[in-house]
């Protein structure tokens, strides 16, 4: 069990900031997920924790001990890579035991650890096959097994499921969650997939452009995104964002540039007439409603079976609605949409959340 | 480095005249090129098999021997201690090739995969030595060999072949092509750099090692100039020096010289056939997918 602390951690490649000064506390035994768009610095941050990447500035502490200068092999971490990184000339069994064999562990010790990994990950059937003879999912299980036999203090995963097809991703996700429950190790997991982040994480760290945008439990991130970036990044389809200006018309309204009005009843006290604000509402909280005056032009409709997604525009802004009812309109049609005022998120002109209280 | 042969990959042709013409033209060119390469060898073989009564300089030249004979090959063994030259050549080649494989891949690994001050300059200097012809280096090299007391010794003969800039370059490129993550996962597991080189990297660059082995072998086996300069004692002669002696000792009986040359080529062909299977690409299959 190991806690991790990052203090002012920075990484520059030449003049490019891959990771800007980052502070983060990861509790012992926590499953923490770094999520963000491609190129935001997730892998760089993970690799600095692993010791594979040197830090430009800042410190890394494991259990309050500074490990910044320690090489990767002395940190007690194990890493699983997106591309598996299995040794192609060795069988699965040899892959599992390679590190232990090379570092002078006794044969019994190696056998014991490999056996345990094989049992946990059910690898028996392909121990004697080489990576080329294994499917992507099987390769990734072997790669996880290879991390397991190291008995590390901390597991690091860099997009381990991104090369797998959707179905396999789903089942591997369940397995990784089960692994965490069983081992109780600290795990740091990188993904660009917000669904993986939501389902696996104890806490999510949302990154953007080398910076932490928000840290929180999956539901905190979902219900109280700190800014428009987090609001849009987490959740699918994306949250709708409508910018406008606050007006008084027998109550507060948000006047959109298409001249449509959204009532701000129950909004945060912090907005005043004349403020430029944006409201956000998740597609799953939008419904078609005759009572509403807010009109959306539907561009296309996507049936997923359980849900139907409507993509279109309100004024000049993209707008999405997700409904469990089947097709209610066709592309090209206009429908009136509504949502409960308490479902609205408010953001100021800089994109920062207004009003901190929970809204559920 | 994965050799990819695409030029002659089978393609489905529609049976139009244009494409048939295309195929014919392509084969004509291939045959012409093959003839240019095989021609001298065939001529050598034919000369080696001509009997003593035949005029090998007649005009117009006669390609097929009138009375083909293998006697010339036998005469080579009588005229020379051919077998002992052969052993010398094998000895020199085996040691030089082994040294080349080990030293070049050892030197190439840090150049490909470690970061240290001056890495690029070192590599540039190494590469630029490839532009100097051996003839230019021969005299200073000889001077050094004499100063070290290495003249007229196998060691002196082998050392210049034991690690080549070309080999370092070839192996560096091969190491560069191996996914970084294979090495990183070994590093995290605490495997030291030498063992990574030995157990992870080397097995994955077998095709490049085979290529280097063949190039080095061909170079060392056929080397004439350097052995001529460094080796005075006939007991230390390699095959090219021996074959050259055939030309001198017997008033240039070209049949004999040709037979000697043919005999000395055989091991080169054998080495090539043996290493060929390592050239098959796909050594990295399954390392990192996607
Ligand atoms: N070795 C490197 N040299 C230069 N720039 C790099 C290197 N590795 C990553 N970067 C840059 O740093 C940024 C963050 O990269 P990375 O951490 O790999 O992003 P992510 O994993 O979130 O997709 C990117 O803009 C990338 O181009
Ligand atoms: Mg990445």
Image (cartoon, coloured by chain):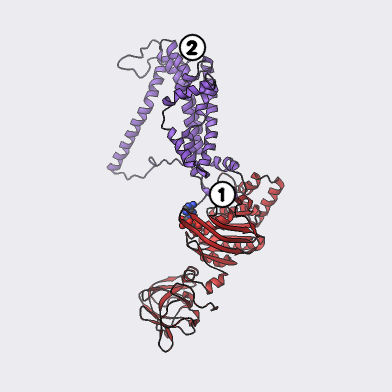
Label of residue B79 in the image: 2
Q: Nearer the viewer, residue A104 or B135?
A: B135
Q: CA distance from mark 1 to mark 2?
A: 60 Å
**Do marks 1 and 2 share a chain?**
yes
Residue B98 x/y as whole percent: 55, 31
Left or right, B195 with reference to A165 = right
Left or right, A58 with reference to B251 = right
Count every numbered label the image shows and give the total. Answer: 2
Residue A295 position (above or below residue A2): below
Closer to the camera: disc 1 or disc 2?
1
Tell me which residue sits at (41%, 28%) in the image: B133
| Residue B89 visible from this viewpoint | no
Chain under numbered label 2:
B
Residue B217 x/y as whole percent: 49, 28
Tell me which residue sits at (56%, 72%) in the image: A219
Chain under numbered label 1:
B
Residue A289 position (above or below residue A88): below
């Amino acid at each position: 069990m190991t806690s991790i602390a990052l203090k002012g951690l920075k990484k520059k490649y030449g003049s490019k900031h891959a990771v800007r000064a980052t502070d983060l506390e990861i509790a012992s035994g926590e499953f923490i997920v770094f999520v963000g768009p491609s190129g935001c610095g997730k892998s760089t941050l993970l690799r600095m924790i692993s010791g594979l990447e040197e830090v430009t500035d800042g410190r890394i502490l494991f259990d309050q001990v500074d490990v910044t200068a320690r090489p990767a092999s002395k940190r007690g971490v194990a890493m699983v890579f997106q591309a598996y990184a299995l040794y192609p000339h060795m069988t699965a069994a040899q892959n599992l035991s390679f590190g232990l064999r090379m570092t002078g562990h006794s044969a019994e010790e190696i056998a014991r650890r490999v056996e345990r990994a094989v049992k946990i990950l059910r690898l028996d059937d392909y121990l004697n096959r080489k990576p080329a003879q294994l499917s992507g999912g099987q390769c990734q299980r072997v790669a996880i097994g290879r991390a397991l036999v190291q008995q590390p203090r901390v597991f690091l995963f860099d997009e381990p499921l991104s090369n797998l097809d959707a179905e396999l991703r789903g089942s591997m996700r369940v397995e990784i969650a089960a692994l965490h429950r069983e081992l109780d190790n600290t795990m740091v997991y990188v993904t660009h997939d917000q669904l993986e982040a939501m389902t696996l994480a104890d806490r999510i760290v949302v990154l953007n452009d080398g910076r932490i945008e928000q840290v929180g439990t999956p539901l905190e991130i979902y219900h109280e995104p700190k800014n428009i970036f987090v609001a849009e990044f987490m959740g699918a389809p994306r949250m709708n964002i409508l910018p406008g200006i606050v007006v008084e018309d027998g109550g507060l309204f948000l006047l959109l540039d298409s001249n449509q009005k959204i009532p701000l009843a129950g909004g945060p006290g912090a907005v005043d007439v004349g403020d430029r604000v944006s409201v956000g509402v998740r597609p799953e909280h939008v419904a078609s409603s005759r009572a509403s005056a807010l009109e959306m032009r539907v561009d296309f409709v996507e049936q997923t079976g359980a849900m139907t997604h409507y993509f279109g525009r309100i004024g000049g802004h993209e707008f999405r609605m997700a409904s469990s009812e089947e097709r209610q309109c066709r592309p090209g049609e206009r429908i009136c949409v509504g949502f409960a005022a308490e479902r609205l998120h408010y953001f100021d002109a800089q994109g920062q959340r207004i009003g901190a209280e929970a809204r559920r | 480095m994965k050799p990819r042969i695409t030029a002659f990959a089978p393609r489905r042709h529609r049976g139009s005249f244009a494409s048939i013409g295309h195929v014919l033209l392509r084969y004509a060119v291939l045959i012409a090129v093959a003839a240019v390469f095989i021609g001298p060898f065939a001529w050598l073989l034919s000369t080696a098999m001509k009997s003593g009564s035949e005029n090998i300089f007649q005009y117009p030249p006669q390609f097929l021997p009138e009375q083909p004979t293998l006697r010339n090959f036998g005469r080579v063994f009588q005229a020379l201690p051919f077998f002992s030259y052969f052993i010398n050549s094998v000895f020199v080649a085996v040691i030089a090739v082994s040294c080349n494989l080990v030293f070049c891949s050892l030197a190439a690994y840090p150049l490909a995969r470690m970061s240290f001050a001056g890495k690029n300059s070192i590599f540039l200097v190494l590469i630029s030595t490839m532009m100097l012809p051996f003839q230019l280096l021969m005299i200073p090299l000889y001077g050094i060999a004499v100063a070290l007391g290495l003249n007229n010794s196998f060691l002196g003969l082998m050392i210049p072949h034991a690690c080549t800039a070309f080999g370092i370059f070839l192996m560096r490129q091969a190491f560069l092509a191996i996914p970084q993550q294979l090495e990183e996962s070994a590093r995290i597991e605490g495997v030291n750099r030498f063992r990574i080189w030995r157990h992870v990297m080397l097995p994955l660059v077998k095709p490049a090692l085979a290529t280097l082995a063949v190039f080095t072998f061909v170079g060392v086996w056929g080397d004439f100039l350097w052995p001529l300069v460094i080796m005075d004692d006939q007991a230390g002669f390699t095959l090219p020096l021996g074959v050259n002696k055939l030309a001198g000792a017997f008033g240039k009986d070209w049949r004999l010289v040709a037979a000697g040359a043919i005999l000395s080529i055989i091991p080169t062909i054998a080495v090539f056939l043996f290493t060929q299977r390592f050239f098959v690409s796909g050594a990295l299959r399954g390392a990192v997918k996607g």
